[in-house]
């Protein structure tokens, strides 16, 4: 009986029906495997779509951060003018960066990144150029000239940085880059060439000179930013800049006064919190999701916002030639940043 049963099973396995059964099972297994592969592919595509949407959302937030930062930098000229009604320029600069340092330094401390002894001289020199040198020149110029004129002159910075990069790092400028520099230079000439009722050559020249200093400390800070990250390096540069600003303020204008009107106090707080600390945090956060070359385009908001606020709230005026000059400066800055952006794509 058992032998017969075994023989029957063996015959059944070799029968056409048994072969068909095995083929059916194999086909079913292949179909299930294909279905699994399709499902896995759909899951991967869905995950990629979700990641792309997240990147897109973060890029939009980064652009918003750049827009806010560029706009806030433009308001610094208005707040500076308001603060100068009661405070000397050195005290305004000191208060601004004391506040900014108190906000930014904890970011570096939390990350437990400390300047090495080897880098201390570079931190000290760069911080000295950032705060006392740049802002004593810029604020003194701003006190003499109009906020509108000063803010438009700030628009010369992108072309000047492009020239410095070509000179010191051997970066080649295309014809569009050199044309942008020429347009910007012509704009500055028209902007300051005819003194109006609100600005003068000396003040404009000091603001322009401060831009040359900015180019110098940007070049000096690049290796520090690469080594320590932008946020940490900025925090320490603010700290050393503020420490070197203190003796300058004491010698220049004496002990800083604490009594000031509500308007001036609000202006000083805005300079330190909004125009310095918040802008650097927003800018550095945005750089995590957008390249620096693309981000540079949004710095062109600074002269535009500064000029508009000067006209609207300080009732400053511009000669027709200065308006044309300011537009040329802004156009040159936009063109050079777009050229850099395309070169890095």
Image (cartoon, rainbow, N blue to C red):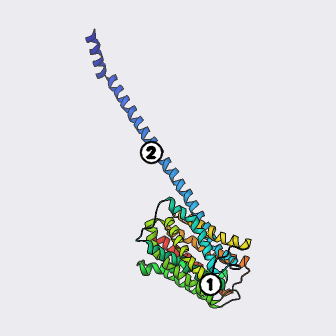
Question: Is residue 66 in view?
Answer: no
Total number of numbered discs in the rendering: 2
Asked whether, in this view, residue 256 is left or right of residue 49, the answer is right
Which numbered dot is residue 154?
none
Q: Position of residue 292 (x, y in %)?
A: 50, 68
Q: Position of residue 282 (x, y in %)?
A: 57, 64
Asked whether, in this view, residue 299 is left or right of residue 36, the answer is right
Mark 1 and mark 2 lie on one chain; the one further toward the N terminus is: 2
Instruction: Single out the residue that lies furthest toward the top.
Output: 1
Say if 331 sits above or below 71 in the image: below
Q: Which element is circle 1 on?
A: helix
Q: Position of residue 280 (x, y in %)?
A: 56, 67
Quarter where residue 198 is shown: bottom right
Which numbered dot is residue 41?
2
Instruction: State the residue at coordinates (27%, 10%).
Output: 2
Asked whether, in this view, residue 99 is left or right of residue 174, the answer is right
Asked whether, in this view, residue 300 is left or right of residue 259, the answer is left
Quarter where residue 309 is shown: bottom right
The residue carrying mark 1 is: 141
Q: CA distance from mark 1 to mark 2?
A: 63 Å
Instruction: Single out the residue that lies furthest toward the front.
Output: 255
> Quick one: 2 or 46, which is closer to the camera?
46
Say if 184 sits above or below 301 in the image: below
Say if 15 sits above or below 65 in the image: above
Instruction: Single out the residue that lies furthest toward the bottom.
Output: 194
């Amino acid at each position: 009986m058992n032998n017969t049963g075994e023989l029957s099973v063996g015959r059944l396995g070799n029968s056409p029906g048994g072969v068909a059964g095995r083929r059916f099972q194999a086909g079913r297994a292949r179909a299930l495997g294909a279905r699994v592969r399709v499902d896995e592919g759909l899951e991967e595509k869905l995950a990629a779509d979700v990641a792309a949407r997240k990147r897109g959302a973060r890029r939009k937030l980064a652009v918003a951060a750049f827009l806010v930062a560029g706009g806030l930098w433009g308001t610094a000229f208005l707040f500076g003018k308001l603060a100068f009604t009661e405070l000397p320029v050195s005290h305004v600069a000191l208060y601004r960066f004391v506040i900014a340092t108190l906000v930014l330094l904890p970011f570096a401390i939390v990350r437990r990144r400390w300047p090495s002894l080897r880098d201390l001289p570079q931190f000290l020199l760069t911080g000295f150029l950032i705060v006392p040198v740049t802002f004593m020149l810029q604020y003194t110029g701003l006190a003499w000239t109009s906020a509108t004129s000063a803010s438009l002159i700030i628009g010369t910075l992108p072309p000047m940085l492009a020239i410095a990069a070509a000179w010191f790092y051997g970066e080649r400028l295309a014809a569009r880059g050199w044309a942008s520099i020429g347009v910007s230079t012509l704009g500055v000439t028209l902007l300051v060439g005819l003194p109006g009722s609100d600005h003068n050559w000396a003040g404009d020249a000091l603001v322009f000179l401060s831009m040359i200093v900015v180019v110098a400390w940007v070049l000096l800070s690049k290796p520090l930013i690469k080594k320590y990250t932008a946020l940490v390096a900025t925090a320490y540069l603010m700290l050393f800049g503020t420490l070197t600003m203190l003796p300058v303020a004491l010698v220049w204008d004496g002990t800083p006064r604490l009594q000031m009107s509500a308007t001036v106090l609000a202006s000083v707080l805005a300079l330190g919190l909004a125009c310095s600390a918040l802008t650097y945090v927003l800018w550095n956060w945005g750089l995590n999701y957008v390249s620096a070359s693309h981000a540079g385009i949004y710095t062109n908001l600074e002269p535009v916002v500064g000029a508009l606020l000067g006209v609207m709230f300080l009732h400053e005026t511009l000669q027709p030639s200065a308006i044309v000059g300011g537009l040329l400066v802004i156009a040159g800055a936009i063109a050079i940043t777009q050229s850099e952006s395309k070169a890095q794509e």
